Amino acid sequence: MNFQQLRIVRETVRRNFNLTEVANSLFTSQSGVSKHIKDLEDELGVELFVRRGKRLLGLTDPGKEMVEIVERVLADTASIKRLGEQFSNREQGKLVIATTHTQARYVLPHVVAAFRMAYPKVHLTLHQASPAEIDSMLSAGAADIGICTETLRSGHSLIAFPFYGWQHGVVVPKGHPLDKAETLMLEALAEWPIITYHEGFTGRGTIDRAFAQAGLAPDIVMSAMDADVLKAYVELGLGVGIIAAMAFNSKRDTGLRLIDSSHLFDPNTTMIAVRRGSYLRTYAYRFIELCSPALPEKVVRAAVMAHAGKTEAKAEAIQRRAAATQLWRSTGNTLSRDEVKRTA
């Protein structure tokens, strides 16, 4: 077993079992990819992939468990490299933050400024992406820290922490009829064309859920990912905006009014997430603590490493299954599969 075989297994899943794409991404030949897979399966004594002829269609049960271990092993390999960097040069390195436009524009500037003052030699990259892309980047090890409201929840590959809570607000041009009401009602809001976030961004699910629960079908005439874009079109009179309240600035948005809608929409919680078991440099923990003082390095590190032992347990399970399969073969297949499983 070698690292190239593990990379091929991981890349095969990422490339939807297309071995031509796997070979291209790893700068090798398709025949070489197939041989590495076959050699690994022979060594383990189990099939990792479901096949139809020479085509790979998916993962077997052992393959599904194997992929989780492979991801962990390769992530740990990257962690070893970070460990060396940590002790050879504590104040230099690279930190990749994957986040949405809303967080990068309205929440993180003061955090980034404080971080840059503390670690001027660390190259900080803010990668703006969709929530789904952020989740994928973290899982693949392409980002160190992810920050957004949607998708980031603790699971088998990620550990997530609450960052802060926030509410949506309704923005209208100055003098708009809705601004004259003492208390804004959802029924009144639904009578106007709505301009708000694209599906999957900045609490859009919370907005949709509120209208659905009230039995209302709002006319969403425009959606976008950027609150500044939404505000620009509201100011033109094209509709009423529902945005993150933090995105409104009374000094800059002089042509608009923000109406409190905390009684209409459920609160949202933005999360900070990292990959389980990943080795983070000291400055990465410091960035998280700058975001939230309630998340010091001791707390985050303990949570990140808490489930490291699960990988070893899964590896042992695969080894037992491989031994059972070899026993079944060595007995000339005279034992039933169920009998072999009981020996594992």
Image: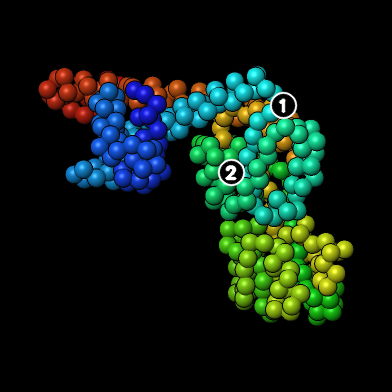
Q: Secondary structure at mark 2?
A: loop
Query: In the image, 179: left or right of 338?
Result: right
Q: Residue 304: give x, y in percent of width and height.
A: 60, 30
Name the residue rendered at 74%, 57% in the picture.
167
Specify the farthest residue to the right: 251
Q: Which residue is mark 2?
A: 153
Q: CA distance from mark 1 to mark 2?
A: 30 Å
Residue in front for this viewpoint, 74 or 315: 74
Residue in front for this viewpoint, 83 or 211: 83
Q: Which labelled disc corresponds to residue 130? A: none
Mark 1 Cα shell of 10 Å, populated few (<14), some (14-19), many (≥20):
some
Q: Residue 37: give x, y in percent of width and height.
A: 29, 32
Is residue 341 visible in the rendered image? The answer is no
Question: Which circle's residue, 1 or 2, is located before the other in the chain?
Answer: 1
State the count of labels: 2
Q: Residue 281: give x, y in percent of width and height.
A: 65, 28
Q: Which labelled disc corresponds to residue 91? A: 1
Is residue 102 visible in the rendered image? The answer is yes
Q: Amino acid at mark 2?
A: Arg
Mark 2 Cα shell of 10 Å, populated few (<14), some (14-19), many (≥20):
some
Name the residue rendered at 80%, 39% in the picture.
114
Residue in front for this viewpoint, 182 or 280: 280
